[in-house]
Amino acid sequence: MRSLCRDNGGPFDGYDVVFIARKNVNEASYRKMSNDLGEALKKAGIIFG
């Protein structure tokens, strides 16, 4: 989770971002989780791009 955060630009100045790993997190690829996290951060307005 820390690597996913760093790879997507974290820590995020001015934001407290909480990551919750669900059961199926072990089944997802790192690339898929990173892409999904990036999209969620964009949707939340935390990162742009």
Image (cartoon, rainbow, N blue to C red):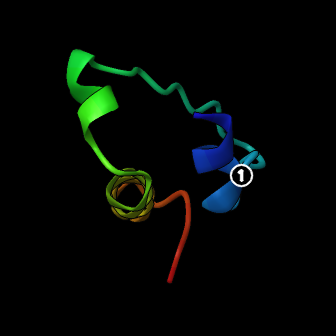
Crowd tier of the residue under label 1, counting other residues whose Cα lies within 10 Å: few below 14, some 14–19, many 20 or above = few
Question: What's under tag 1, amino acid-wise?
Answer: Arg
Residue 26 in percent (x, y) is at: 33, 28
Q: Which residue is located at x 31 percent, y 29 percent?
A: 25
Q: Nearer the viewer, residue 37 or 32?
A: 32
Residue 47 left/right relative to 3: left
Residue 16 left/right relative to 36: right
Residue 15 in percent (x, y) is at: 66, 39
Quarter of the image with the N terminus is top right
Q: Which residue is located at x 42 percent, y 65 percent?
A: 42
Q: Is residue 37 above or below residue 24?
A: below
Q: Nearer the viewer, residue 16 or 4?
A: 4
Q: Which residue is located at x 46 percent, y 61 percent?
A: 45
Q: Quadrant of residue 2?
A: top right
Residue 38 in percent (x, y) is at: 44, 62
For disc 1, the marked residue is: 6
Query: Residue most toward the bottom?
Result: 49
Instruction: Determine whether the residue tagged by mark 1 lies in a helix, strand or loop.
Output: helix
Q: Is residue 12 above or below residue 26?
A: below
Image label count: 1
Residue 39 in percent (x, y) is at: 34, 63
Q: Nearer the viewer, residue 30 or 19?
A: 30
Query: Residue most toward the top?
Result: 23
